[in-house]
Image: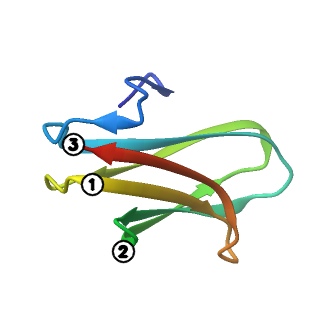
Amino acid sequence: GVSDREPYGIAEEFSVGAETVFCFLEAENIELDRIVSFVWYFEGEKKARVSLPIQEGKRWRTYSSKKIAQLKGNWTVELQDESGVVLSTVSFRIH
């Protein structure tokens, strides 16, 4: 989750009882305003794309969340820039 703009409960495995999973981004030294996308995949199939702004400055924090609908298995979230270039990837498993 996210509380007071900080992530908590960080893990690579979650119980199916966790209804929602969050992906947190902390960016530093942003030179230009831009849009980034959190692209959520379950077992290789795209389930969602959430596009959010980050603004020029020293530090910016944002996050995306996804209701996992009791989908057990492997999840991946890609952080992409406006052109679709993958900037970072995180993976987790629901069991």
| Element under disc 3 | loop
Name the residue carrying label 3: 95
Which residue is pictured at 34% across the width and 36% down the height?
Answer: 13
Q: Residue at x 60, y 57 (%)?
A: 53
Single out the mark in the foreground, 3 or 2.
3
Quarter of the image where one finds residue 3: top left
**Which residue is drawn at the image coordinates 38% and 42% (left, top)?**
22
* Above or below, comparing residue 77 to residue 7 in the picture: below
Disc 3 to disc 2, how far (Cα)? 18 Å
Q: CA distance from mark 2 to mark 1?
A: 12 Å
Quick check: marks 3 and 1 in contact, CB under 8 Å? no
Note whether 86 is above or below 91 in the view shown.
below
Residue 49 lies left or right of residue 28; in this view the side is left
Instruction: Tell me which corner region of the image, top left, top right, bottom left or bottom right, holds residue 76.
Output: bottom left
Residue 48 position, x and y percent, is 37, 68
Colouring scheme applied when the structure was drawn: rainbow
- Residue 14 at x, y percent in the picture: 28, 36
Residue at label 2?
45
- Say which amino acid is labelled 2: Glu
Three-letter amino acid code of the residue under disc 3: His
Which residue is denoted by mark 1 in the rendering?
73
Which comes before the other along the chain, label 3 or label 2? Answer: 2
Amino acid under disc 1: Gly
Secondary structure state at the residue bearing disc 1: strand
Residue 50 at x, y percent in the picture: 45, 64
Q: Circle 2: is it few (<14), some (14-19), or many (20+) Cα within 10 Å?
A: few
Q: Residue at x 13, y 37 (%)?
A: 17
* Circle on res. 16: none
Residue 75, x across and y down, in percent: 37, 55
